[in-house]
Image (cartoon, rainbow, N blue to C red):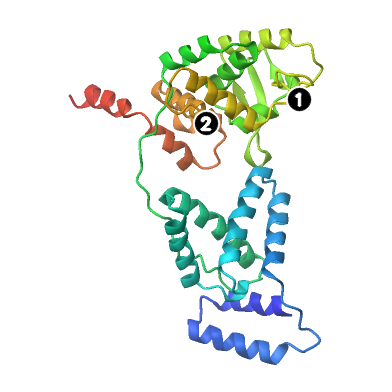
Amino acid sequence: METKVVAVLNEMAEYLSVAQMKKLQEVMLKSFMTKEAEKKDILNEEYLKMFLDAKKIEGCSDRTIQYYHATVEKMLISVTAPIRKVTTEMMREYLSDYQQVNNCSKVTVDNVRRNISSFFSWLEEENYILKSPMRRIHKIKTNQQVKEVISDEDIEKIRDNCSCQRDLAMIDLLYSTGIRVGELVSLNIADIDFEARECIVFGKGGKERKVYFDAKAKLHIQDYINSRDDDNPALFVSLDSPHDRLKISGVEIRVRQLGRSLALQRIFPHKFRRSAATRAIDKGMPIEQVQRLLGHSQIDTTMQYAIVNQNNVKTSHQKYLS
């Protein structure tokens, strides 16, 4: 019955003032909620569990689920009021304190805000609450910095510094396809079509797409596969027995080691993705095709790569305005 009451209130929200809505809610609950229909209040932790279960069903990755869990759980520990009584003011205070206590950037706080907002939006959609307290807390403005990419010279240095065929194949595949590190470690040998120089990856939300690699990557991947004596179907495996499928953390650690050994600044897997996208944009690939290549659901995400290299602006200025 209470769920139906919330549904009615949601329908009337655009026609009544806040005061009228509160009075309507009070009257409806008093009139229609009998003692037999009253249910025990759901604990905040139970709401969180239901939310995480829903996200799993939607196809979110384990990493995303863990991030949701950690972020929302930390908020619920600090904001102890029952979910239905959490206000916008409480959440504004929490986010403000979060930034001061953790001494973190605005980008980090906005990521926290976005995760918590998803939690409350889900509660609203499921009619557990009347209105999300995060509705009036908007995106936190951050300074947009020009992000660095890996130069052609540095890529050659990294290639030359690879001490095994696996690392060389891994670096070339990351750089030529622009795939995410999670997509890289999920690849199997059977997923690779060497004739067409393409492979199928499963991105965020389990979305399938084709990505393409160059001739150099093809040769290095083939050399790597031919050098292996294990029967693991995974494309990339650990160097030591029993040669398990390589994990995301394993790729991140190895890539950082390669960068540090050459004294290169901040080399990590996602930088290869950004570099591949920037090269594509520099060479004139339409932004819609770059979006398809990277597997972005929103073109706004892809547009962030279009402003990576300030040289793009300088070259265009010289061409059209100088």
Q: Dividing the image into 4 quarters, which one contains the N terminus?
A: bottom right
In the image, residue 50 above or below residue 286: below
Residue 204 at x, y percent in the picture: 63, 40
In the image, residue 182 above or below residue 164: below
- Between 115 and 291, the one lying in front of the other is 115
Dot in front, 2 or 1: 1
Alpha-carbon neighbours of circle 1 within 10 Å: few (<14), some, or many (≥20)?
Answer: some
Instruction: Read off the residue under disc 2.
Output: 270
Residue 174 at x, y percent in the picture: 56, 23
The answer to whether residue 61 is seen in the rendering is no
Label 1 secondary element: loop
- Between 287 and 184, the one lying in front of the other is 184
Q: How many marks?
A: 2
Answer left or right for 177 relative to 50: left
Q: Dividing the image into 4 quarters, which one contains the C terminus?
A: top left
- Disc 2 residue type? His
In three-dimensional space, the C-alpha distance between marks 2 and 1, rounded to whole angstroms, equals: 23 Å
Answer left or right for 260 relative to 56: left
- Between 175 and 195, the one lying in front of the other is 175
In the image, residue 33 above or below residue 64: below
Answer left or right for 240 relative to 36: left
Name which quarter of the figure residue 49 lies in. Answer: bottom right
Q: Which mark is residue 175?
A: none
Label 2 secondary element: helix
Name which quarter of the figure residue 122 lies in. Answer: bottom right
Answer left or right for 299 relative to 145: right
Instruction: Read off the residue under disc 1.
Output: 244
Residue at 71 percent across and 50 percent down: it is: 56
